[in-house]
């Protein structure tokens, strides 16, 4: 029995993971569930999946969580706080950790799971964007496994022999990351001037949280995935290309030096990537409808519009700059997106905030988590200062 900790259980990745786990009760058990502040949703999941431990990140809500669980008759341990989430990720109650906490908040628990040698299913791209070298070192030291859950990286994982070979000696020419283009594909900058948060969160193909939906609309999500691909697969920036593919059926491709291009296709359903990561190298049923290619529209591919969707260009810039530039990029973006969702920043100005922060803070080497967290804080304060000056 594989015991699985789902960090961020009340989010979309968490929900899809629990759906796959529930389909295979003889193979998997959801032993640890965590949430940020969604007590009611966490209680419902505990009643359904009967974990051994439930953790709420906000300590002020631990009492309410315990009371509600007691009222339902669900018997599981209760804990709270960021440290409790991290301890659960590294603890003895799980063999596999699904890292699905959104944003920089998921860094410590992801690193803890890696150090503890867990089978780490990475859905929190911000962790590897911020601290790629540190995360890979932790995985190597812990002796566990790192398997990407993002559909694009999971697709590349499936198209590479052995999942993550040495690209320099495996005949790989390029990694081709596909992007849906988000809800505003084909629009000009002038047409994006008055975009609202609700419009930005209406993704045409995927059901996601609001933050990642905005990142998809700006193409920053694809930029973060470019940086993630660099760390996961050891690919240089010039060996990673983004292709806009609005149908979201080809999840990514690998081009080899002999001219072969291997692609992974499937319906846009995250349960495919999650099931693959949970069972690898085996395959199991995930509840995903078969792909009917005969019924599909023609598959389209086009280059991204970097002039309109500047966040993608800024991500490539940060990757080429190296060091902690990706961490600064991510921190500035999180602040800018939060301001946009609050109605305090125009959609097009998200890129302006990120660009200003990258220009203000010189890149430094990634040496340890403490320094990285300090630099993350500096970038966030710089972004807030840019926001204040813009008002």
Image (cartoon, rainbow, N blue to C red):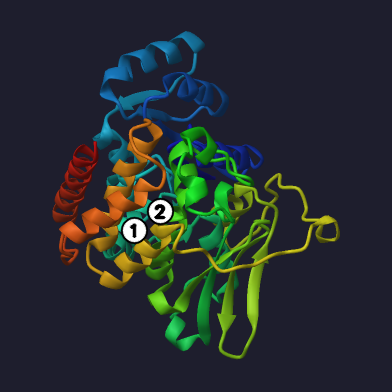
Relative to 165, does residue 179 appear above or below in the rendering?
Answer: above
Q: Position of residue 255 (x, y in %)?
A: 58, 80
Please identify the residue farthest to the right as the structure is shown: 294
**Which sits in the foreground, 96 or 250?**
250
Q: Secondary structure at mark 2?
A: helix
Relative to 207, does residue 275 appear above or below in the rendering?
Answer: below
What is the CA distance from the residue labelled 1 to the residue labelled 2? 6 Å
Q: Who's the residue at 48% across and 58% down the image? A: 148
Q: Secondary structure at mark 1?
A: helix
Which residue corresponds to mark 1?
Answer: 129
Do tag 1 and tag 2 residues touch (Cβ < 8 Å)? yes
Relative to 18, does residue 185 appear above or below in the rendering?
Answer: below
Quadrant hosting residue 16: top right
Q: Who's the residue at 36% across and 13% down the image? A: 64
Q: Position of residue 58 (x, y in %)?
A: 30, 26
The C terminus - image quarter:
top left
Q: Is residue 334 left or right of residue 289?
A: left
Which residue corresponds to mark 2?
Answer: 125
How packed mark 1 is, by other alpha carbons closer than 10 Å (few <14, some 14-19, many 20 or more), is many
Q: Position of residue 152 (x, y in %)?
A: 54, 60
Q: Is residue 251 left or right of residue 9?
A: right
Q: Position of residue 136 (x, y in %)?
A: 32, 64
Quadrant hosting residue 65: top left
Q: Is residue 151 left or right of residue 314?
A: right
**Which sits in the foreground, 248 or 41?**
248
**Residue 111 visible to an observer of this rendering:** no
- Numbered circles on residues, count: 2
Q: Who's the residue at 13% across and 55% down the image? A: 371
Quadrant hosting residue 311: bottom left
**Residue 107 visible to an observer of this rendering:** yes
């Amino acid at each position: 029995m594989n015991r699985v900790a789902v960090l961020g259980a009340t989010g979309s990745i968490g929900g899809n993971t629990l759906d796959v786990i529930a389909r295979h009760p003889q193979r998997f058990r959801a032993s640890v569930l965590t949430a940020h502040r969604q007590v009611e949703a966490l209680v419902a999941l505990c009643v359904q999946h009967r974990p051994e431990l439930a953790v709420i990140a906000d300590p002020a809500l631990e009492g309410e969580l315990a009371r509600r669980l007691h009222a339902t008759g669900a018997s599981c341990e209760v804990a709270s706080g960021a440290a409790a989430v991290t301890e659960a990720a590294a603890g003895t109650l799980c063999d596999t950790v699904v890292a699905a906490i959104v944003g920089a908040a998921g860094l410590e628990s992801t690193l803890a799971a890696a150090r503890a040698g867990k089978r780490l299913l990475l859905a929190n791209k911000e962790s590897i964007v911020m601290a790629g070298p540190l995360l890979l070192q932790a995985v190597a030291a812990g002796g566990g496994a790192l398997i990407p859950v993002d559909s694009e990286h999971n697709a590349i994982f499936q198209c590479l022999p052995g999942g993550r070979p040495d690209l320099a000696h495996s005949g790989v020419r390029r990694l081709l990351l596909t992007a849906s283009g988000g809800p505003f594909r084909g629009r000009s900058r002038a047409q994006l001037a008055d975009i609202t948060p609700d419009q930005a969160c209406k993704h045409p193909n995927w059901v996601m949280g609001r933050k990642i939906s905005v990142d998809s609309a700006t193409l920053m999500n694809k930029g973060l995935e470019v940086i993630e691909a660099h760390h996961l697969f050891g690919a240089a920036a010039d060996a990673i290309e983004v292709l806009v593919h609005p149908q979201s059926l080809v999840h990514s491709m690998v081009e080899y030096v002999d001219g072969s291009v291997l692609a992974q296709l499937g319906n846009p359903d995250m349960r495919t990537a999650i099931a693959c990561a949970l069972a690898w190298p085996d395959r199991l049923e995930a509840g995903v409808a078969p792909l009917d290619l005969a019924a599909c529209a023609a598959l389209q591919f086009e280059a991204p519009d970097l002039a309109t969707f500047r966040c993608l260009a800024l991500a490539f810039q940060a990757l080429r700059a190296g060091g902690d530039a990706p961490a600064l990029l991510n921190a500035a973006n999180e602040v800018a997106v939060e301001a946009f969702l609050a109605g305090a920043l125009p959609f097009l100005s998200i890129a302006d905030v990120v660009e200003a922060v990258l220009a203000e803070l010189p890149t430094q080497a990634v040496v340890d988590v403490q320094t990285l967290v300090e630099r993350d804080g500096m970038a966030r304060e710089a972004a807030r200062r840019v926001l204040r000056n813009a008002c």
